Amino acid sequence: MFNNLTDKFETIFKKLKGQGKLTEKNIQDSLREVRRALLEADVNFKIVKNFVEEIAKRAVGTQVMKSITPGNQVVKIVHEQLINLMGNENFEVKLHDNRLNTIMLVGLQGSGKTTTCAKLVNHFRKKTISPAMVACDIYRPAAVHQLEILGSQLNIPVISDIHSKNVIKIVKKALKETERSSANFLVFDTAGRLHIDKKLMEELRDLKKLLKPDYIFFVADAMTGQDAVNVAKEFNDQIEFDGVILTKMDSDARGGAALSIKAVTNKPVVFIGTGEKISDLEEFHPDRMANRILGMGDILTLIEKAEASFDVQEAEKLASKLKKNKFTFTDFLKQLQQIQKMGPIDQLVGLMPGIGGKALKGLKIDEKEIKHIEAIIYSMTVKERENPLVINGSRRYRIAAGSGTSIQEVNKLLKQFDQMKKMMRNINNPKFLKGKMLPF
Amino acid sequence: MDLNHVIFILAGIIVIAFIIGIIIRVKKRSSELEKTLKNEISEKEPVSLKIKLAKTKNSFIGRIADLVSQREKLDEELLEDLEEILIQADLGVKTTLDIIKKLSEKIRNERISNSSEIKQILENIVRELLLKDYSLDSDFFHLQNKKPFVILFAGVNGVGKTTTIGKLAKRFKDKGKSVLLIAADTFRAAAIEQLSIWADRAKVSIIKPQPGADPASVVYDGLISAINKKIDVVLIDTAGRQHTKINLMNELSKMSRTIKKVVPDGPQETLLVVDATTGQNAISQAEMFNEAINLTGLVLAKLDGTAKGGIVIGIKHQLNIPVKLIGVGESLDDLRDFDVEEFVKAIFE
């Protein structure tokens, strides 16, 4: 996500860092770069204008003069301003135990409402009782069927009426059906529509009046350009939504729409869609996103992902092994598999501070390479995994043949593993932790 | 957070770093890294170019300011307005600055001072840009005699590929051609059914595979059947995919190679469908899809909203891929030829 913007800022601030003092002139240069970076990230030009003016106001003057490193000062200002722009608090969806909770999704065609509907209901299924989805898209061919397929994949019921040409009736049917059941959570998928389509916007207003949903989320494509403000404003004016779900964040889109929509509607981004899998829905954290924009990495998301997919007991075992410096290939194999569970490697790498931006640009990480590593380890005996030192020439030959790789690759892995163990020894050193402590 | 936990997380990170280390080493000798390096080098160029352009623009505005003091009616504000119009239409910073630069040269060379004339010149520049290497008499619906004429559609998720194919099928059908649709989007839920509804509406035939089938083999079977039935036009729907996902892009180029096996000079058209609301990311999309399947043109979908779709000007300018069709609505007849005049007018509306 935002990687490109991060790169831009990195170059800009590198230039700034070289300067001893911040003058009005050199700040003008970097402001022009900030402006362009934001425009290229599809932030609306009016919002960019205000943003840059605000930065200029704050940067020039005493604040900067007091600072020891002016470059860092500007980074801080831009960072704070980005958080301000994207909303500085996290939005929380509050669910009621004793009554029906409803969420309605609205947006343009192709923004990803139907997929998001399934992701959302899946996200809340543990916190709710027999949740269901309601298919209100009676216009797009096979839209209802699409939701039904997603529902059957998730084993979550879908309330629909293929023969009905009246959305209001479908909603009434859904409410009636859930009245008698124990269900307390419904997500309504509506048809994609243009914000200037009067008839369909009126339909949404009628829906809202009837349903009185707890939350209306505006689903927007992260790749949206300058028009994002017009669309979001119109939807918000007509049926006032509560928050935004930004989809397709797994692309290389810079996602300036996130900033634009918040600025023009004052409604926060609540979730982001990060892939085609049902589980690819994450909460949106403006502070983390601002960190990413500025190349500070997103260590919090990484930890959250780790916590979600790692086994606590395994983790503790590993930690104690690390402390005793007894990390073996068996542990490494386990780690590899766990990390793959966390998501695509390149996404994880993007979250890591320091190496997110330039170092890996253009380098595509092929998951197949990891399979090779796994194959090599699988071809080792238990003894070899526990104690790699016993791996001599003929064992190497056997391992290479067994894994379908070359001796060179086996050698490389052994060497890297050794280096990694050395690095891990450093982790045990308390000084290392203090020095490189994560920026919480 | 206890210490065990932190150590554990760090170990995870180290493992990732370790994997990356290996991968980088493995790839060191391969051409891919060379390519990366080349990219890095060439990426440095545009930066300096951009700075240059920025200077040009600045001094241009300065020059205009001078002009204002000498002559009337032409001022900095007008140029900023023009720049904003272009940016707001999603042309992107680079294309906008290039166009403004061209405008500045024209104004200097032809000593123009009237602001209404300037707008006219700007429109002409954009028009010329869009029409470069473009023969006006080439009718998209004029087909060669060879059968079948194969059109492959691609694009990111949710841009309107399936809808576009449905509408295009209708147009070919109306011109008396026999049309076959191949539903090679076997991934997305109900995509096959969505296309078959369009096939019913347009009254054309369709190849419907099982969901999850291998798209390349679906394409193969479809084309064989098209040849046997002597079909005129074959339209192939593919799953929406992010251009950054290598495996999915490889899958797409495999489909393109499969087409060539059955129809040696196919696909005669490879069209990228672009959503008119898309911003600067569309350039990256066009670049990557072009690399994978050699695009012959663009379809600009959803132009019936308030988005101007100016990104296609950026794509034409930077990659020289022309727009061939535009989508302006959800009904069967809402697919039109790309009309440069109309499009340029709308940008400056």
Image (cartoon, grey):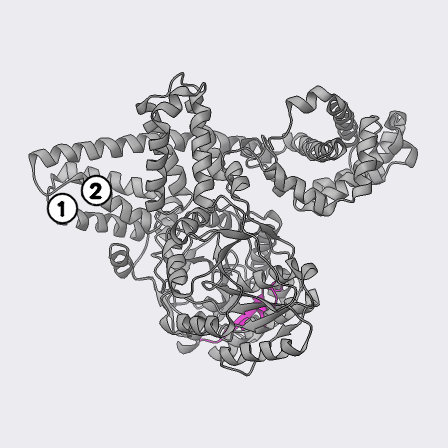
Relative to residue B308, is residue A353 drawn left or right?
right
Which one is in front, B167 or B133?
B167
Residue B312 marker:
none
Question: Nearer the N terminus, badge 1 or badge 2?
Answer: 2
Where in the figure is residue A410, as x and y percent of width and height?
79, 31
Neighbour tally class for label 2: few under 14, some 14-19, many 20 plus, Cα within 10 Å: many
Residue B178 is covered by the magenta coloring: yes
Where in the figure is residue A282, as x and y percent of width and height?
60, 50
Q: Is residue A153 above or below residue A387?
A: below
Where in the figure is residue A71, as x and y percent of width and height?
44, 24
Q: How far apart are marks 1 and 2 (CA)?
A: 9 Å
Residue A92 is covered by the magenta coloring: no
Q: In which quarter of the image is residue A115?
A: bottom right
Residue found at x 82% / y 42%: A313
**Label 1 sits on residue:** B115
Neighbour tally class for label 1: few under 14, some 14-19, many 20 plus, Cα within 10 Å: some
Which one is in front, A43 or A81?
A81
Any part of residue A17 in sight: yes
Which one is in front, B114 or B161?
B114
Residue found at x 84% / y 26%: A324
Amino acid carrying label 2: it is: Leu
Which chain is disc 2 placed on?
A: B
Which one is in front, B313 or A325?
A325
Where in the figure is residue B39, as x and y percent of width and height?
50, 34
Q: The magenta stretch spans which residues?
A: B176-195
* Secondary structure under the numbered disc 1 in the rendered image: helix
Q: In which quarter of the image is residue B238?
A: bottom right
**Label 2 sits on residue:** B79
